Image: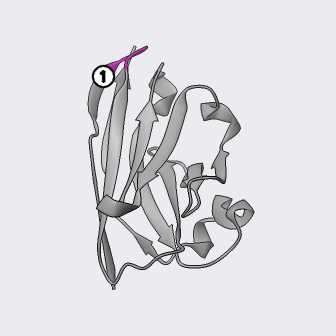
């Protein structure tokens, strides 16, 4: 079992920034991919960003390119999501997930992830 705990969410004004963190514990191993998804009220969970174990391969949803940056620190079992230029439409619960296998290009799919965190709320006011 792997446990994921997200933190860093909160209330911010439009144009502001937040940095989300996701710490993994338990039976973590090397080689996994990590991803961030989000879910707004009444909407399906959607892909935000993903990063490979090495950090070399990264994917972003089109709507966050140039604003969000995903990174990871394997020594700390932590993945980050730096969110800048936040917009009201970024308001959602943000979830991190870990996928033990699969190519980075598949990380846009919700069903390839093995474990999820409980989520952290991000609210952007206009």
Name the foreground residue: 24 vs 90.
Answer: 24
Name the foreground residue: 42 vs 28.
Answer: 28
Residues drawn in magenta: 12-16
In which quadrant of the rendered view does residue 1 lie?
Answer: bottom left
Q: Is residue 87 above or below residue 90?
A: above
**Dominant secondary-structure state across the stretch colored magenta:** loop
Name the foreground residue: 71 vs 2.
Answer: 71
Q: Is residue 20 above or below residue 56?
A: above
Q: Residue at x 57, y 55 (%)?
A: 51
Residue 49's spot in the image, x, y percent?
57, 48
Q: Is residue 103 above or below residue 119?
A: below
Is residue 103 visible in the rendered structure shown here? yes
**Residue holding disc 1:** 12
Assess whether residue 44 is covered by the magenta stretch: no
Crowding at dot 1, Cα within 10 Å, few <14 / some 14-19 / many 20+, comes out as some
Quarter that holds the C terminus: top left
Q: Residue at x 51, y 53 (%)?
A: 37
Q: Residue at x 68, y 63 (%)?
A: 104
Q: How is the image coloured?
A: one colour
Q: Residue at x 54, y 74 (%)?
A: 31
Residue 16's spot in the image, x, y percent?
37, 17
Q: Does residue 40 appear to the left or right of 1 in the view shown?
A: right
Is residue 77 visible in the rendered structure shown here? no
Residue 12's spot in the image, x, y percent?
30, 22
Helix, strand or loop for disc 1: strand
Residue 125's spot in the image, x, y percent?
35, 19
Numbered label tally: 1
């Amino acid at each position: 079992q792997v446990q994921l705990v997200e933190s860093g969410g909160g209330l911010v004004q439009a144009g502001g920034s937040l940095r989300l963190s996701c710490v993994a514990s338990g039976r973590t191993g090397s080689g996994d991919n990590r991803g961030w998804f989000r879910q707004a009220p009444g909407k399906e969970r959607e892909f935000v960003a993903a990063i490979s174990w090495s950090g070399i391969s990264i994917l972003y949803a089109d709507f966050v390119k140039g604003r969000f940056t995903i990174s990871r620190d394997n020594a700390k079992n932590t993945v980050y999501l730096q969110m800048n230029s936040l917009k009201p439409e970024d308001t959602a619960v943000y979830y991190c997930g870990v996928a033990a296998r699969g190519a980075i290009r598949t990380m846009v799919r919700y069903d390839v992830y093995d474990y999820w965190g409980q989520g952290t709320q991000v609210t952007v006011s206009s």
